[in-house]
Amino acid sequence: MKRIFLILTVFSMVFTSCDPLEDINAEVDAQQTAIVGDVVYTLTDDDYDSLDKTYGNFNSVDEAKELIPELLFDLYPVWGKASSALVTFKRYNPIDTYSAVVYELEYAEYEPITGNTYGNFSSGGDVFDYLDATYPTPTEGDFVSLKYDYYSGSASTLTDGFAYENGEWTKFTGFTEDQYLTMGEGFPNFSSEDEANIKIPIALIDVYKYDTLSAGDIVLSMYELYIGGGDTESYTAAYVYDGETFSAYENEAEETIQFGHDGTTWVPDNTIKYTLVRNADYEYMASQLTGAEYAGLIGNLSNYGDFDYNWTDAQIQYALAIFLDYLNPSAAEGQKYILTYVIYDNGENDYQTSFIKTDGVWVLNE
Amino acid sequence: MKKITNFLFIAVVCLFSTVILAQSTVSGTVLETGIDMPLPGANVVEKGTTNGVITDFDGNFSLKTQSSSGEIVISYVGYTSKTITFSGDSNVGNIELESNQVGLDEIVISATSFAIDRKTPVAVSTIKSADIELKLGTQEFPEILKSTPGVYATKTGGGYGDSRINLRGFSSENVAVMINGVPVNDMENGAVYWSNWAGLSDVTSAMQVQRGLGASKVAVPSIGGTINVISKSTDAEKGGNVSMSTGNDGYQKYGMTLSTGLLENGLAVTASAAKVSGDGYVNGLQFSGVNYFLNISKIINDNHKLSFNVIGAQQTHGQRFNTRTIAQNRATEQGGKRFNPDWGYRNGEIENTSFNFYHKPQISLNHDWNISDDTFITTAVYASYGTGGGRRTDGSGKFTNNDYRLGDIDQPIDFDRIVEENKANGALGSTDVFAASNNDHKWYGILSTLKTDLSDELVLSVGLDGRYYVGSHWYEITDLLGGQYYLNPNSNDNNANEPLQVGDHYNRDYEGRVLRSGIFSQLEYSKDELSTFLSGSISNTRYGRSSFLDDSSNPNGNVSDNANFLGFGIKGGANYNLDDKNNVFANIGYFSKAPFLTGNVFLDKESVELNEDALNEKVFSAEIGYGYRSGNFNANVNVYRTSWLDKSVTSRVNDPDNQGEYLEANLAGLDALHQGVELDFVYKMSEKIKVTGMVSLGDWKWTSDVSAEIFDQSGNSLDEVIVNADGLKVSDAAQTTYALGLNYKALETSSIFLDYNYAGNLYAKLDITRSEDRLDTWKLPAYHLFDLGFRHGFSIGDLDATLSGKMNNIFDVEYISDAFDATELIDGVAVHNSTNAGVYYGTGRTFSLGLKVEF
């Protein structure tokens, strides 16, 4: 009996310490598996403060690229390689504004331009011809506001601004007298800037009702304030469209940049992650792989929507590159993709491969 | 490793050491119960010592004992041992031993090809019902055999009935499994699905593993060995039992057995049924099954006996199909032992993407006919109607998309979300659905053996083995998961791009037909201590197939021509009993067998085009063995060498010159050599303590390479097939296994046991025809496991009751039982290691407790 217990004890001592997977588990544990996160994020006012950007915007995209990784690290301290963040931020983007006392053309000034005596312009180019004649040597940043008569079926009086930018006159369309009337103004001007900023966004909806604007588009406008002594002064202003309404442009442009985690830090990165749709995406590859080499392989693509163990890595990469050309034919040089796909090898498991478009073709992005 | 080997030897040696004292003389006569025939060669041993003698030809013995009083143990292989007390010089008179040869008369042995100890020259392990009852617990049926040499048994994914057994390195298609002599291996692919036979353990009278060529007299032998299972029959005593057991993870089993015993009119009926259910050790592997067995036997007269058997198990169970790497498993909350990626919740209930439902009852009618004193015929006519399938998923990939989980990647699948999305899809149909891969069969067979004694020494057996099998295989939609229909995406299907409803077939719909007919004959010569046999068989296997759903791939019609394969086998062996204790045996054989229908008989799975160059596989095997029998120590050792020749390798590519045609290469000559040494022993250290042990050292390797190029008509190489296999280890079964068991009989009806098992030299599974780099696959870490159990017999009033408990893997060892090879690129070199291999973890600690009351 004693002997049995002795044997039992020896057995237990010899074998309980035996953990078959000890070494492999230790190896696995030593390789820290990163937590992979994907986020769409818009910077808050606090975020700018934390980056010492007290104006609530970045001076440039480059500055944003430099500072945002710091912020992402604070926000997502445990995220690692292959994480992504689509970050929307504000960039300081001032638009030059102009102002000038309105100059009203006299009757005699039309004839040298148009060659007739109707006392108005009647084609779109007339007013620019007038500018060229009147200001033969403009300098960059010059601005004039002209009040002139224009005939197009019937005569009307227009007030438009013209700025000399980049070597040519750019037109700022002012409001017509009728439009001021619609905005409740007895005279074709506003009494204050505040009033202008309240009424103009409403008026712009009507002005641009036939244009296809998209959210974020900036439009330039011009309005008049009465400055006394019978004079009015024109002011240009920028307004931003949010998809439904206009509001005064705050000299900040919204930008969105994608960042990726490279294992060490966040870097600007354009990687698009895509999981292949079964069986459709696999069927597309099957339809394109016509070479003899693939004859015995493609059956499983369309039948099961996966690769299988008969495929070599090189064959899978070749097929996926063909698929990327189909998925995004117009992808820009340097565009990266992480594709997730299924391989059947005694069971199904997900695999990921990263590609980058280089010299017009998709190559492995190690 | 050496340490363990040394330890095993030391342990065994220790157990032999004894102390010598003194003396009395005890005499008596040993007889067989009932017939009072003397038993020559029975062992008579003074209890607690190795002091013993053997009975003479008339069953008499005289033993000089070392103590003046005590007990003597009388034992004989095939009989229940008896213990007799003595005091001083005495004659204890007649001692009757009861046969425990599980009631196997000569006909049963002959019909089932059971091997007889010290007579049939094969390596064999026999496990009787008491041991099955004691050791099974919640284990799978094949796992009972894990302590026998040459066996590697695992639960694979862990689902109920998903276990597998490899014998001498050969997987189940090369291991014949026979129930009452009737073969149950799938006729098309040779595989054995243990879930079909889940109730077998309840009604098994004995099972015998014959390794290598074996003693089977069926016309088509197997390479690895034969597992013979014999159910209870007319030997059943009147009465019955009810049993219930419970265990880990919701395991519940209720069962009953009732036997009329042999009635006066010669009729005997045994019926048995059990209900099993549980949640499964692995997550999402809930199961539920009913097992049943019915035997109606009628002894018509002295010469005729009829026996009608029905055995079946209807079951459903969740499965773990998809494997993960060790790192992926380790990252889960559950850990690899319990993590299963293939299940989730639907309406608050467990739902599986991998799910199995089958019912394949087998019905047989056996007729035993004693034609004369010298001649009898035993005939089994059998039929099996199987139905069932395994769940498949189809669609856009939501089931494998980790976004559709209730949390992170280790969490259950959110089936409700998929249902919601299918519903929202309305008239656009379901994006993702459940389907089933159904496999039904109809199977009819006859197996008949005539045995006649030509003389006292010479016995001739001749027989026939005929089988006809039709297997139907199709996919059907089983659940649209909330959607209105599913658009058939399979462009090859006749109903491609049509809306499918539940029950509609798609993707695959064909039937395979197998007609096999064979004859065999065997001549046995026994004289004195020598028994020899020589047997030969010849068989024809005819394959045919019809394809119902893929006209585009079968331009020449949907019904194949028949393909015939002629196979033959010849084997012989001899056993010589050197004396009452020692015997030696040898056997040798060669056979050529038809490839499996699912092998390379047809060009592909659904095609009805025959592969003109399909080849038979050939096997050559030789074995020698030695056996030692004494009253308290039995041991066997054998050496085997099996050559598996011409495993076929095929490859094909589209013929660029002929649209729709293929160019192919059939390569013969991929060979393997399985050789090894097997040792097993039973040592009855005392009446109370029994030690069992086993050492199995295999050396299983591939021994050749094959390669070929496929050219088009212009001589351009289209594809190159290279298999660099020479010298590589055979994968997927442990080549080294040890077992050591200790059984302590605390009381007459109570015992406890401790079993130790070791598995090593196990290589990750790889289809050898994929090997190009001539590198062994990943070698899995070897593992040691301990099981502990007890059985306590007691009485409830007049009824005998047994309480039994079992704990498997008592130290909750974490180990890998099954792995699928994959390489890792390290500095541009593909290395076979653990990194990317998909694995199944073995089961951790499990337990069960059962009560059986007999009446």
Image (cartoon, rainbow, N blue to C red):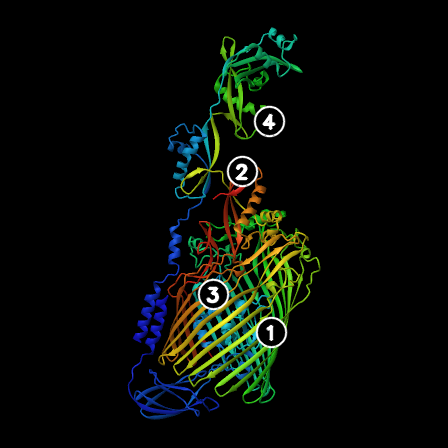
Residue that numbered label 4 is attached to = A211
Q: Is residue B273 visible?
A: no
Quadrant for the N terminus of chain B, please: bottom left
| Chain of the residue that carries numbered disc 2 in the rendered image | A
Q: CA distance from mark 3 to mark 2?
A: 50 Å
Q: CA distance from mark 2 to mark 1?
A: 64 Å
In percent of width and height, residue B816 lies at 43, 61
**Residue depth check, mark 4 versus mark 1: number of the one nearer the observer:** 1
Residue that numbered label 2 is attached to = A359
Secondary structure of the residue carrying tag 2 is loop
Residue that numbered label 3 is attached to = B733
- Amino acid type at circle 1 is Phe
Q: CA distance from mark 1 to mark 3?
A: 28 Å
Secondary structure of the residue carrying tag 1 is strand
Q: Which residue is found at the position 35% from the left and 64% from the top?
A: A16
In percent of width and height, residue B186 lies at 58, 68
Q: Are marks 1 and 3 on the same chain?
A: yes
In percent of width and height, residue B840 lies at 46, 60
Residue nearer the viewer, B684 or B759? B759
Q: Is residue A189 left or right of residue A55?
A: right
Q: Is residue A234 left or right of residue B812?
A: right
